[in-house]
Image: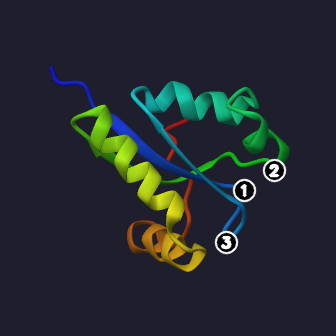
Amino acid sequence: MNKEYFVYILASKRNGTLYIGVTDDLITRVGDHKKGTGGAFTRKYKIKMLVHVESYPTPAEAIHREKCLKKWNRAWKIELIEAGNPLWNDLYPA
């Protein structure tokens, strides 16, 4: 079985503060954010909703995409989220 690498976007609420990350264990990493152990930024701004996910076959591709997304302006990020998740549902399977 091939390993997957994920680029994900979390939000504090619809149109709220966004966080973009990369991981090879999406369930554990998002779970950490939800528990408040994912990082200082997400903890400070209560960023816990998984609103967008992309998968890649290599860590290099995932990291490249993460860096690109972080350079995008906010409107583009919101457009990306709403293209696949127009209601801003939490995609975390919990």
Q: Is residue 80 left or right of residue 33?
A: left
The residue indicated by pointer 2 is 45
The disc labelled 1 sits on which kind of residue?
A: Ser
* Mark pair 1, 2: CA separation: 7 Å
Marks 1,2: beta carbons within 8 A: yes
Q: Helix or strand or loop: what does disc 1 sit on?
A: loop
| Mark 2 neighbour density, 10 Å: few (under 14) some (14–19) many (20 or more) | some
Q: Is residue 30 above or below residue 10?
A: above
Which residue lies most toward the right here?
Answer: 44
* Mark pair 1, 3: CA separation: 8 Å
* Mark pair 2, 3: CA separation: 13 Å
Report which quarter residue 57 is drawn in: top left
The quadrant of the image that shows the N terminus is top left
Q: In this view, does 16 lie above or below 9?
A: below
What residue sits 40% from the left and 74% below the top? Answer: 83
The quadrant of the image that shows the C terminus is top right
The residue indicated by pointer 3 is 15
What residue sits 73% from the left and 26% below the top? Answer: 37
Q: Considering depth in this image, is 86 or 5 the residue closer to the camera?
A: 5
Residue 2: x %, y % from top left: 17, 24
Q: Nearer the viewer, mark 1 or mark 2?
A: 2
Q: Is residue 90 left or right of residue 36?
A: left
Q: Residue 12 carries which label?
A: 1
Which residue lies most toward the left here?
Answer: 1
Q: Helix or strand or loop: what does disc 2 sit on?
A: loop
Report which quarter residue 29 is drawn in: top right
